[in-house]
Image (cartoon, helix red, strand yellow):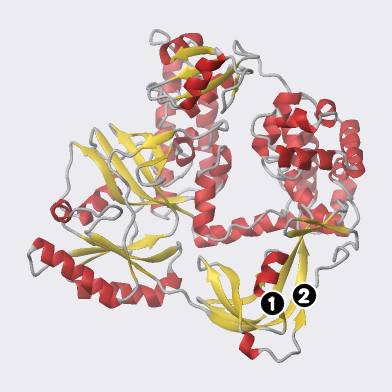
Amino acid sequence: MTKEEAQKRIEELRKTIEYHNYRYYVLDSPEISDEEYDKLFRELANLEKQFPELVTPDSPTQRVGALPATEFATVTHEIPMLSLDNAFTDEEIRAFDERVRNSLKTDHVEYFCEHKLDGLAVSLRYENGILVKGSTRGNGYTGEDVTQNLKTVRTIPLKLKGENIPPVVEIRGETFMMLKDFEVLNEQRQAMGQPLFANPRNAAAGSIRQLDSKITAQRKLYFMPYGFGVIQGISFETQESFLKQCSEWGFRVNEHNKKASSIEEALSFIHYWVEHRLELSFPADGVVIKVNKLSYWQALGNTAHAPRYAIAFKFPAEEKKTKVSDIIFQVGRTGIITPVAILEPVVLDGATVSRATLHNFDIVKQLDIRKGDVVRLKRAGMVIPEVVGVDMDLRTGKEQPLLPPNRCPVCGGPTEWDGAYLKCVNITCPAQLKGHLLHWASRDAMDIDGLGETLVDYLVDGNLVTSVADLYTLTMQDLLTLPRLAEKSAAKLYQNIQHSKDRPFFRVLYGLGIPRVGLKTAQALAEHFGSMDELLSATEDDLTAVEGIGQETAETIIKALQSDQVHKLIDKLKTIGLRMEQEQTEGPLKGLTFVFTGSLSSMSRAEAGQLVQSLGGKVASNVSKTVDYVVVGEDPGSKFDKAQKLGLNILDEKAFLDMVGKNEKSM
């Protein structure tokens, strides 16, 4: 295929894929199967791999996530992203209306009603219809550049649809997670022994602020617009017309939004959703009432922190009482023993609740919760059941205080305290083993497709595996003994397990599940030490020399690596043939470390860092004597001053682009 033929086919595929993205994520009306969509996507990805010069920022392939960023650049909001004043009663809403009418000197004001989405506020900047920057709200005046992460959100167009495209427009809105997707995510985290997200807002915020956008891409996030920042070349008369234009540009707009001819009509909207909020598929903690006519916004102005043309009515939190019939203990992947209250079932916010995690023994002590207590219960973020207090007046004296177990409730092994957490220290504990196997098989670790929770239960309960190393000794006959696993599925799983031996060293290291060693830390350790043998012989001082690793993390890593059980596991994995050395990325920047400070005009700092890594170099977030080059953009910070004091090599943006072959001539 010639380059011209490839470009034509790439353009066809991009148009088709974005059409189906729009049908699936915005309209909720898919026209093709997932398998057909995946086939189109793979064809596009293969063509772009064959012709990398044809890749553009608005290609659907750019949604899958980029290389991990070392830090987020700061973004200054030209027009501040203000917060909203809150109201909790009808009287406060009517008082807001009176203030608005008095200020405008009119008896009648039209309002626009929207749900107050409970996620993370972000701003999207489009230039000539192309998404060029995405940032968090931050403190309202400055946020963080999370462009690469926001590109993975399918309801955010990489290129605006239609013909009415302005030169510049900043679309502001909320990134969030659907309630059902949030519950699935927490179920997965619980199965892997990872901490649960408290609510969908935390899950969305944590996903968008991931340094590794590939992790963000795995989370099912959505975006809905609610406002705008800078706009050039286009204007709107009302909030209603602005959101209608957003829909035409390809955004998913809340179908429940409604225009209200008076404040009483707006109150009717509020009353309806106070009663029916459980019917919503997305997290909302209230209703926002805005003056619909945009020319009134400027006349009304803002206070220091909030606009005078809008107010948020907050939904009241439902709280109920129920009895604690028992308190049990669960053991996660890292061995943490979590107390869980078993409750007499109660309907709370439309869902039947029969259990609630008590998180750790410090919280149990603070609440003084006992078996037999009557407790007050609410659902955090309308999802996770949470015990918020004990009704001491209803105590009979028969309630039983909770005593932390001396032995692991699953394996009977020894326990020890780690701050507020009680841990089982036997890494062969079946409960830990199941979580460890799921972690080992996860996408960021060994990526063993098909090894899910059900099969892990069968493997452990049937004594087929006692460590992750045993996965590699499983035969086809072993797998065929597992229920619900036919020959074709068993063969595929066997193949996937064997292929996982080729995963790079840093993923093996991450898969070991060492406390405090996430994916980014595993990559840093692998790059710094180069091999498992070097890491095993490292001292605490050696570890703290690695960027991002402090004293506590170093102590935790040393303790884990000195365990006989971990040593035996690593020896087995070596014998099996898993990679225990870091492959060196070849390229002209191999062996060189860069730090970026200030704003670059040709690309974001995250993109510049990814470019350096693709050429074999390393990117550090802090200036030190081990840094080879400090690249300085506009408005550099204290890193520039430190680099000058240390006498480091300092490059401006042009010199950096010349070094990496990205100067104007080569571009």
Q: Position of residue 413 (x, y in %)?
A: 90, 59
Please rate how many residues cluster around mark 1, counting C-alpha atoms within 10 Å: few if below 14, some from 14 to 19, many from 20. many
The residue lying at 27 percent from left, 43 percent from top is: 229
Q: Position of residue 161 (x, y in %)?
A: 30, 40
Name the side, left or right, on which 34 lies relative to 155.
right
Query: Cβ–Cβ below 8 Å for labels 1 and 2?
Result: yes
Which residue matches tag 2? 402
Task: Indicate whether 226 appears above or below 609.
Answer: below
Q: Which mark is residue 369?
A: 1
Find residue 264 and report its image quarter: bottom left
Name the side, left or right, on which 98 lies relative to 621.
left
Find residue 151 and report its image quarter: top left
Which amino acid, by three-letter code, is at mark 2? Answer: Leu
Q: Position of residue 327 (x, y in %)?
A: 75, 75
Which amino acid, by three-letter code, is at mark 1? Answer: Ile
Query: Depth check: 51 or 509 in front?
Result: 509
Please rate how many residues cluster around mark 2, counting C-alpha atoms within 10 Å: few if below 14, some from 14 to 19, many from 20. some
Q: Is residue 138 visible?
A: yes
Query: Depth check: 276 or 229 in front?
Result: 229
Name the side, left or right, on which 576 lies relative to 158.
right
In this view, the residue farthest toward the bottom is 396
The residue lying at 91 percent from left, 34 percent from top is: 571
State how far apart marks 1 and 2 are (Cα).
7 Å
Mark 2: secondary structure:
loop
Q: Quadrant of the C terminus?
A: top left
Q: Which mark is residue 342?
A: none
Q: Is residue 109 visible?
A: no
Mark 1: secondary structure:
loop
Name the side, left or right, on which 167 lies relative to 326.
left
Sequence-first tag of 1 and 2: 1
In this view, the residue farthest toward the front is 645
